[in-house]
Image: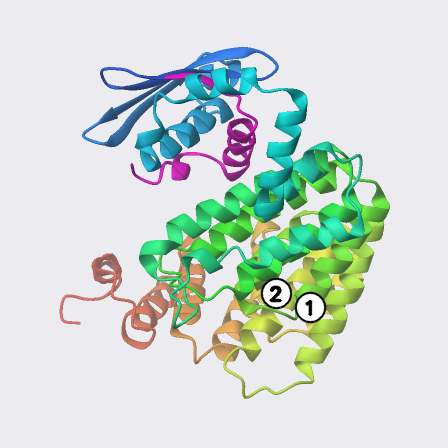
């Protein structure tokens, strides 16, 4: 079966996994074109999954969310159940006899069996403690963290300690399942400090795991983890949210593979004023360090521009005065993104003379970046055209074609309107 998880939003997959692990999928039956089942939650919903030549072709659920043309957690739960059935076909049909056998056991016998299994299976022991303990002890948290650190071992090549491409999907499913087992219950039980500790273990495991990342496994798992962080931000007290922000800022100087996701998460979340002020202070310090650092690095300009734009957006969010914003732009005028904002504002306010001045200056400052120069020329062409300055329109078209190397044939056709037949 194809990777059906791609059809769902990550948090829907996580909730579906939780339903599946809680045995909410009941009465799974094979039909002529797929499977149907009932999923038990707050209510009981019927789910139908259809396949054609082994490919997923349609899903249906009677819940309100699915009726609005969405793929729901109940569908995901049934697909988890089908995936397990496909992985262990020999087990099909044995659930009833097992249930009958368990019915015959006494409480003492069941307790003895569960204890024996838990002593042999660390994952089972951790799940039992997480589900039935009133609150995890520090030792139980360490046990869970140890299991998380070892999540990649079953999928690694024994000689190289590396997960090959063909194993990455199974590894991703294992980590996704573990996140649903350990993180969601902690959120549900408001064990936020333990959530942060175990989330940290997941983060480091995902970032450190060596694997063939051709299909984006690492990014996909980090995105799922960020979904749990988003949930935490919405339900936890400010003290915990502050700890999460502190943790995120600390990690920004760590794994390069996670920097983009962390930057996006920090920027989009933590919108209260005191968090915005903290982020601004932090990123201004980072920007200052970058500007005083090694400018020969290939990534120096990218990082400087990125953090300068982030600081500017934070200043805007905090309601800084126009004078302060202009001062910040002037102090970082080499950042093309800041000049683009100034150009856009000048055009929006119909201050076209200023816009032309900024565009001409930007062409000079960014002369080595042909793509940027072409963009500036296009904007100048549009302004000159609106003003009826045909000679200047012609100049910009010629520059785009012959200097900036823009190969758009439409520009050549447009140039015909501004040159003589001889030219």
Left or right, residue 327 beside residue 53: right
* Magenta-span inclusion, residue 25: yes
Left or right, residue 388 beside residue 350: left
Residue 398 % position (x, y) = 30, 71
Element type at mark 2: helix
Residue 47 % position (x, y) = 41, 16
Q: Are marks 1 and 2 in contact (CB under 8 Å)?
A: yes
The quarter holding residue 297 reads bottom right
| Residue indicated by mark 1 | 329
Q: Tell which of 415 and 141 is nearer to you.
A: 141
- Label 2 Cα crowd, 10 Å radius (few <14 / some 14-19 / many 20+): many
Left or right, residue 169 beside residue 347: left
Q: Tell which of 412 and 204 is nearer to you.
A: 204
Residue farthest to the left?
422
| Residue indicated by mark 2 | 338
The quarter holding residue 372 reads bottom left
Q: Is residue 267 visible?
A: no
Q: Residue at x 72, y 32 (%)?
A: 132
Q: From what the image shows, is residue 131 above or below residue 39?
A: below
């Amino acid at each position: 079966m194809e990777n059906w998880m791609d059809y769902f939003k990550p948090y829907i997959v996580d909730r579906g996994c939780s339903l599946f692990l809680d045995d909410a999928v009941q009465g799974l039956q094979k039909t002529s074109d797929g499977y149907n089942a009932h999923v038990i939650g707050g209510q009981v919903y019927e789910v139908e999954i259809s396949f054609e030549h082994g490919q997923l072709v349609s899903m249906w659920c009677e819940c309100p969310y699915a009726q609005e043309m969405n793929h729901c957690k109940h569908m995901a739960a049934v697909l988890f159940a089908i995936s397990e059935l496909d992985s262990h076909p020999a087990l099909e049909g044995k659930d009833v006899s097992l249930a009958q056998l368990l019915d015959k056991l006494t409480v003492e016998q069941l307790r003895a069996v569960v204890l024996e299994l838990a002593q042999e299976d660390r994952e089972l022991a951790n799940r039992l403690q997480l589900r039935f303990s009133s609150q995890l002890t520090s030792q139980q948290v360490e046990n869970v963290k140890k299991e998380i650190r070892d999540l990649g071992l079953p999928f690694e090549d024994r000689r190289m300690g590396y997960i090959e491409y063909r194993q990455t999907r199974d590894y991703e499913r294992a980590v996704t399942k573990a996140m649903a087992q350990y993180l969601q219950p902690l959120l549900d039980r408001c064990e936020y400090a333990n959530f942060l500790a175990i989330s940290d273990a997941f983060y480091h495991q995902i970032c450190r795991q060596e694997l063939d990342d051709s299909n984006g496994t690492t990014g996909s798992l980090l995105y799922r983890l960020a979904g749990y962080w988003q949930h935490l931000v919405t339900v936890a007290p400010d003290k915990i949210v502050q700890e999460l922000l502190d943790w995120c800022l600390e990690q920004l100087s760590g794994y390069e593979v996670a920097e983009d996701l962390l930057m996006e998460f920090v920027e989009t979340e933590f919108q209260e004023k005191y968090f915005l002020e903290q982020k601004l202070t932090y990123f201004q310090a980072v920007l200052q360090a970058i500007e005083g650092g090694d400018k020969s690095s290939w990534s120096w300009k990218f990082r400087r521009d990125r953090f300068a734009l982030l600081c500017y957006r934070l200043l805007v969010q905090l309601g800084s005065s126009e004078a302060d914003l202009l001062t910040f732009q002037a102090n970082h005028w080499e950042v093309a993104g800041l000049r683009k904002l100034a150009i856009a504002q000048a055009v929006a306010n119909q201050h076209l003379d200023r816009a032309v001045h900024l565009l001409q200056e930007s062409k000079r400052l960014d002369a080595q970046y042909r793509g940027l120069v072409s963009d500036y020329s296009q904007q100048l062409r549009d302004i000159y055209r609106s003003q009826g300055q045909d000679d200047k329109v012609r100049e910009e078209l010629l520059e785009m074609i012959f200097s900036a190397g823009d190969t758009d044939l439409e520009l050549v056709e447009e140039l015909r309107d501004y040159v003589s037949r001889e030219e």
